[in-house]
Image: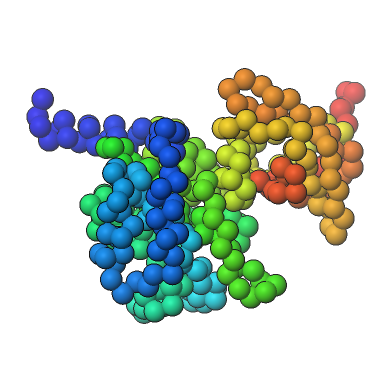
């Protein structure tokens, strides 16, 4: 076989493997995390030295990358106001490619200056820093650009890629991670960024990762079953707690649903670790009214959970599937009058 064809087939096969954190279930990350916390507060004036400090005492690439990822996720603040400014400018120039390109170039310079000076940034800065530190540690890492959907970005009509994350190659397989969404969130009540490390975005299951990430190049979905952008944007919104608990919606595949009054609605979840199904509730918002409902729940085979609920009244409902008080996903359900069958 031609050596170039062989190389291409090999690379494609590596990309298709659904690589995830469970591949390293026998690896103890305590040492890597301890090193990351030992260098907490270090500045970014010398990235090669920082990479050396984080990795030199670790024996393998997955531990080294873990130390880098943990350090970035627990030391770099999300820059909320910069994010809002960028979003506003991009919307303003969406029909003027010259002005949009000019803004993107100017903004990129601002992002990296602020990252270096204040350790504050948006997703682009997080992804750049993870890649840079990994590369200095001789670990192959790429920046992946695409679309992200969470509670602050649920628009089903996104026109531009709005998010960046990383793919990292470990033991000849590619893995996905998102240090931005691992790091925490900006609190609009206190006007401060609150670190709240979410380990679920580290070497995440590709099927789960694809629930709120869609890459510009679909090869970086890292899974055989491909989706398209339209399907991604119309899907239910998935929140960060889905990653904390590794449980996520699989059916229905659309966020907006219609059902007849007094007919049963069914929701299916994929449970990767075995949650306590007694913690599942439906939070149903109807205007200003909020109800917490205990639905009918059944655990099926292969980690699938079936949730059933009958809507007794017509109207439009925001239906949040909760684990305790934490929402993992949202559907919008329109309940209609029951159809009257013709007797003719």
Identified at 72% across, 32% down, the residue is: 277
Q: In this view, does 71 lie above or below 248?
A: below
Residue 249 rendering spot, x and y as whole percentages: 62, 38
Q: In the picture, residue 152 is in which quadrant? A: bottom right
Quadrant holding the C terminus: top right
Q: From the viewer's side, name the closer residue of 11 and 137.
A: 137
Residue 100 rendering spot, x and y as whole percentages: 40, 74
- Say whether residue 311 is left or right of residue 116: right
- Say whether residue 5 is left or right of residue 34: left
Residue 9 rendering spot, x and y as whole percentages: 22, 32
Q: Is residue 228 above or below residue 92?
A: above
Q: From the viewer's side, name the closer residue of 62 and 186.
A: 62
Identified at 52% across, 40% down, the residue is: 208
Quadrant holding the N terminus: top left
| Outermost residue toward the left in this view | 2
Is residue 131 in view from this perspective?
no
- Say whether residue 56 is left or right of residue 126: left
Q: Which colour scheme is used?
A: rainbow
- Say whether residue 279 is left or right of residue 110: right
Q: In this view, does 330 lie above or below 9?
A: below
How many numbered callouts? 0
Identified at 50% across, 75% down, the residue is: 82
| Outermost residue toward the top in this view | 301
Identified at 46% across, 73% down, the residue is: 120
Residue 92 rendering spot, x and y as whole percentages: 50, 76
Is residue 313 in view from this perspective?
yes
Q: In the picture, residue 333 is in which quadrant? A: top right
């Amino acid at each position: 076989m031609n050596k170039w064809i062989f190389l291409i087939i090999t690379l494609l096969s590596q990309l298709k493997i659904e690589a995830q954190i469970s591949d390293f279930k026998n690896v103890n990350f305590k040492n890597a995390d301890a090193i990351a916390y030992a260098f907490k507060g270090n500045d970014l004036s010398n990235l090669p030295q920082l990479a050396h400090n984080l990795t030199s005492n670790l024996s393998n690439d997955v531990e080294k990358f873990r130390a880098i990822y943990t350090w970035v996720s627990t030391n770099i603040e999300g820059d909320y106001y910069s994010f809002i400014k960028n979003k506003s400018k991009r919307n303003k120039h969406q029909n003027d490619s010259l002005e949009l390109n000019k803004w993107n170039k100017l903004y990129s310079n601002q992002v990296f200056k602020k990252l270096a000076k204040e350790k504050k940034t948006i997703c682009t800065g997080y992804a750049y820093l993870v890649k840079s530190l990994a590369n200095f540690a001789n670990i192959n890492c790429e920046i992946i650009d695409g679309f992200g959907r969470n509670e602050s970005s649920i628009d089903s009509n996104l026109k531009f890629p709005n998010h960046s994350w990383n793919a990292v190659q470990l033991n000849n397989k590619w893995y996905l991670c998102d240090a931005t969404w691992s790091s925490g969130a900006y609190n609009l009540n206190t006007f401060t960024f609150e670190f709240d490390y979410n380990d679920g975005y580290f070497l995440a299951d590709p099927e789960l990762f694809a629930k709120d990430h869609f890459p510009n190049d679909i090869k970086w979905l890292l899974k055989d079953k491909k989706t398209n952008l339209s399907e991604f944007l119309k899907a239910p919104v998935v929140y960060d707690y889905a990653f904390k608990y590794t449980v996520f919606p699989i059916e229905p595949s659309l966020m907006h649903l219609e059902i007849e009054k007094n007919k049963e609605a069914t929701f299916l979840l994929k449970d990767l670790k075995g949650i306590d199904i007694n913690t599942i509730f439906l939070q149903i918002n109807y205007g200003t009214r909020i109800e917490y409902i205990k639905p009918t729940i059944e655990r099926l085979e292969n980690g699938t959970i079936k949730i059933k609920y009958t809507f007794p009244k017509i109207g439009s409902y925001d239906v949040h599937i909760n684990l305790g008080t934490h929402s993992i996903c949202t559907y919008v359900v329109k309940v209609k009058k029951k159809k009257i069958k013709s007797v003719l």
